[in-house]
Image (cartoon, helix red, strand yellow):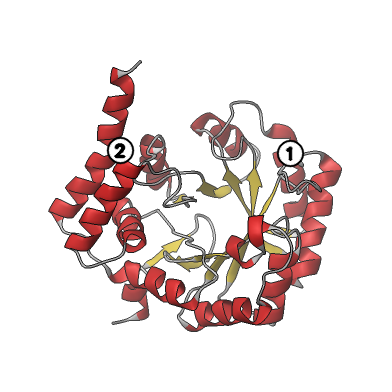
Amino acid sequence: MTKQTKLGGSFTLPGTPIQLFRMGYGSMQLAGPEIWGPPRDVDAAIAVLRETIASGVNHIDTSDYYGPHVTNQIIKKALHPYPDDLVIVTKLGARRGEDKSWPHALSRQELIDGAHDNLRNLGVDALDVVNLRVGGMMAPLEGSIEEPLTVLAELKRQGLVRHIGLSNVTPRQLQEGQRITQIVCVQNFYNLAHRDDDAFVDALAKQGIAYVPFFPLGGFTPLQSSELDRVAASVEATPMQAALAWLLQRSPNILTIPGTSSLNHLRDNLGAAALELPPDAIAALNAIAKTVRAASQSTQ
């Protein structure tokens, strides 16, 4: 099995020479409980990161507000100096409150300070890709993103940021953003059970823009979970593997960033890229969101 097969093939970010394997790694779970403070076992977190890279993954998703600061510091300790082909994608637009909340941090100074926090804790001179995070915790909120995105565009002109993406945005906000700077990726909440972005995924694919779903198993009802379990068993895979394989087969512009602090789970997740779901499994998984949507509409 080739690296390409193992990791779901590659995708080139638009207007760049950057080729990312479609199976990446999300670092959020490397921090302590509630994504706060250090993990119980820093050495185990380092081992996960090093095996991730040894497996060929070249796309790590992170943010300096994970911890805060903790996750980026672990990435630096584990992997610096970084492999030439490794792309670290980070996020700006939020911070952590002392009560472990996630308030917005979209003012000019907050964005500049956040960029420098990422640079310092990752130990780099420039950030490969920065996603501007707007909207709510899980869903976009309409409204202009011009002011914060203009700050990121300035950081890009200064050479501190190489490329820019968006997180928790609507198609209208993407269009506004594209009038300000090139957008190479969009990161939104999307999975088998939450498919509000179906049309957005397809529109981005036509533009050659990467779509990076977060929480691939987030927000499932017991009914949805049991159906996913059944389909996964039918293809001799775990539910997480089936959900990730569905995402990879959903559209060629989808990049996955499953996160874990466990070596065994990491190996399972990476194995999903080689799982080819048959048409009947795809149909059963597609029906999950349709059934729940129909049930919701019937009660309105």
Kindly identify which residue carries mark 1.
Answer: 148
Residue 53 placement, left or right of 273 = right
Above or below, comparing residue 259 to residue 123 in the picture: above
Q: Quadrant of the N terminus?
A: bottom left
Residue 172 placement, left or right of 255 = right
Amino acid identity at mark 2: Ala
Q: Nearer the viewer, residue 189 or 297?
A: 297
Q: Quadrant of residue 3?
A: bottom left
Instruction: State which mark lies toward you, 1 or 2.
Output: 2
Q: Residue at x 78, y 46 (%)?
A: 99
Disc 2 is placed on an element classified as: helix
Q: Earlier in the sequence, mark 1 or mark 2?
A: 1
Disc 1 is placed on an element classified as: helix
Q: Residue at x 29, y 71 (%)?
A: 274
Above or below, comparing residue 290 to residue 97 in the picture: above
Q: Residue at x 86, y 44 (%)?
A: 109
Kindly identify which residue carries mark 2.
Answer: 289
Q: Residues within 10 Å of mark 2 (few under 14, many from 20)?
A: some
Q: Residues within 10 Å of mark 1 (few under 14, many from 20)?
A: many
Image coords of residue 68 (percent x, y)? 75, 58
Q: Residue at x 16, y 59 (%)?
A: 278
Image coords of residue 117 (percent x, y)? 80, 60
Q: Quadrant of residue 151?
A: top right
Amino acid identity at mark 1: Pro
Above or below, comparing residue 16 to residue 113 in the picture: below
Q: Nearer the viewer, residue 27 or 250?
A: 27
* Disc marking residue 235: none
Image coords of residue 32 (percent x, y)? 67, 64
Residue 109 in view here: yes
Q: Quadrant of the C terminus?
A: top left
